[in-house]
Image (cartoon, helix red, strand yellow):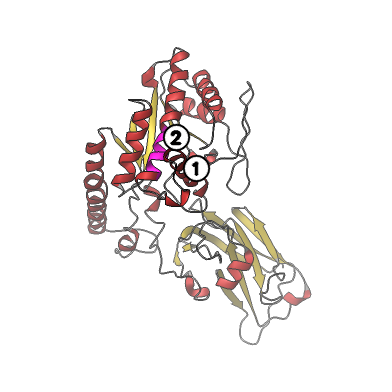
Amino acid sequence: MADYAVRTGGQVWSPNGSKALWEYDYKNKLGICYEDLIALCNQLGADPWLQVPHDVDTQFIASFAALVAANLDSNRRVWIELSNEFWNTAPANLMQNTYARERDAAAFNVPLSEVDNNGSEAGWGTGDLTGNFLKTFKDKWSALGKPADQVVGVAAGLRGSANYNSAVYNQAEAVQPGCVDVFAITTYFGNSLSGSLVQLDYDTSGNASEDTFKEAALLFEADIYGGIKNRFKATANALGVPIVAYEGGQHLTATGFINANPGTGSGNMTPREGDNEFRFGLWNPHLIAGDNSTRSSLADSIVADNYLTFTIAGNPGETLDLDGGALSFFYNRYSMHAAQDLAVFASAGGFTQGDEIATFDGQTGALSVNLAGTEFNALTQLELRIYLYDAIYNAKHQCSLTALSIDNGL
């Protein structure tokens, strides 16, 4: 749900009885307004988890509470959280991290440069912001005559940072005792499993023996017990509130899916073939040092050699006449951060930017490229390359190519 609504700052929203339009910060698309998110949850019988930007004021929060109260079914609960990952110093999250640190610097009259990024000082600022948000929402909720147990107040922390977590919780509770109902920490469940799972014995169609399933089950059990139960039990006991894992499962195959490294030529994808599908993980080839949140461009992918390539040739002594033909394939994105755009190049025209014979902007599903021009005639062979770009974050984000075919147009 967080990926469909804005949770950072700098947005304007005026609840005035009509649906609020939010500027979605993922490839400049419009997000989904709270009213529709709540309506969806009502229909599904699910409890919404709603976030608001870090820099909202008390009027916004009170209006937000009134909007939820007016739209949420009485048998549903709402989980509320201020922004997202205050501890995260990646460029995409730096706005709220700085905002929390500024809160601490102002309260204790110290330079911002002396406030840590995700320790007890930044934790105090995050907790102060969180506590005031939860207090304002719950006060308005109560004033509207709504039951208190219909709201779940969420404070969020950082895995492995006891000082930060304690500071967030303690300061939020200092603002309003009892405002924090659960403490959310990312688990990164499965983050280290992929490399082991992909080595298990199964065929190219994904079939596996009972023994292989048992081996996989043991890996899952060890990760859950060691990575979640043991690690977060101490945090839950220390804070005295339930711990909820707000993300982690998506990391199961985000890393280790294939042996891929950036900058090693076209072989860096090394796709697995099975059931006519190339499923692969692709590095985001951003070229800005220290910045993993800049969306990659076609130029980045060309420099990094991030492409799929295949070559077709006629029988010995024959030539290919493909003018009027078409290249067809099916593209799918398994990861939210996988490449959104594709560019197709042919050896008949060249592989330099500007030579592409087709581009696809944010399109998935069945795609087709016309092979038009005399340069596609009388060929001994033709190499085609599909460059993938407009990805984000430095990880191997999964996508696939299925049902690739070429029609000669005859």
- The answer to the question of whether label 2 and label 1 lie on touching residues, with beta carbons closer than 8 A, is yes
- Seen in the image, is 229 located left or right of residue 68? left
Amino acid type of the residue tagged 2 in the rendering: Leu
Instruction: Let me know if residue 125 is in the magenta part.
Output: yes
Extreme residue toward the top, this view: 145
Instruction: Let me know if residue 69 is in the magenta part.
Output: no
First in sequence, mark 2 or 1: give its number: 1
Amino acid type of the residue tagged 1 in the rendering: Tyr
Instruction: Judge by depth and name the residue closer to the eye, 168 or 190.
Output: 168
Is the magenta region chiefly helix, strand or loop? helix
Instruction: Judge by depth and name the residue closer to the eye, 24 or 116.
Output: 116
Under circle 2, the secondary element is helix
Name the residue that disc number 1 marks. Answer: 99
On the image, the x and y values in percent for residue 278 come to: 49, 63
On the image, the x and y values in percent for residue 72 come to: 48, 22
- Seen in the image, is 39 located left or right of residue 14? left
Instruction: Judge by depth and name the residue closer to the eye, 105 or 259.
Output: 105
